[in-house]
Image (spheres, helix red, strand yellow):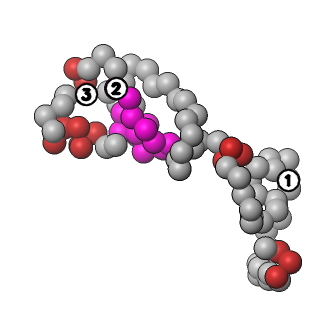
Amino acid sequence: MSLEQLLSLGIKPERKRILIVKGVIAPRAAYEPIAAEILLVDTPGSTCANPASFHYRRRRHPLYPLEPDTEYHRCDTMKRTANDF
């Protein structure tokens, strides 16, 4: 939820003791300027902060951050085959 959405409803977030906002990245940018403290929690849902909590049936390997120790090399051309999927 953006700060402007609250303001358009007449809610003044800077006057509230506690605000709870679901999101991964956008709420931090919106609320850090007015928040004394931001607590990050990893809740389930489509915007989960931990990609390892999702169950992938088809994905490339390696895929950061699921394999953080993998070395990635730059390639000028990417050629894929059916076995890559």
Estimate how packed mark 1 is, as few (under 14), some (14 to 19) or many (20 or more) residues with alpha carbons within 10 Å: few
Tag 2: amino acid? Leu
Q: Is disc 3 in contact with disc 2, using a CB cutoff of under 8 Å? A: yes
Q: Label for residue 13? A: 3
Label 3 to label 1, Cα distance in Å? Answer: 42 Å
Q: Quadrant of the N terminus?
A: top left
Label 3 to label 2, Cα distance in Å? Answer: 7 Å
What residue would you read off at disc 2?
19
| 33 left or right, relative to 9 | right
Quarter occupied by residue 44: top right
Whole-percent x, y for residue 39 in the image:
49, 24
| 50 left or right, relative to 9 | right
Whole-percent x, y for residue 25 in the image:
48, 44
Residue at left offset 74%, top offset 62%: 57
Sequence order check: which comes first, mark 3 or mark 2? 3
Residue at left offset 16%, top offset 42%: 8
Label 3 vs label 2, nearer the camera: 2
Estimate how packed mark 2 is, as few (under 14), some (14 to 19) or many (20 or more) residues with alpha carbons within 10 Å: few
Q: Is disc 3 in contact with disc 1, using a CB cutoff of under 8 Å? A: no
What residue would you read off at disc 1?
70
Q: Quadrant of the C terminus?
A: bottom right
Q: Which type of secondary structure does the marked residue at label 3 adopt?
A: helix
53 and 49: which one is in front? 53
Label 2 vs label 1, nearer the camera: 2
Sequence order check: which comes first, mark 3 or mark 1? 3
Q: Label for residue 42? A: none
Label 3 vs label 1, nearer the camera: 3
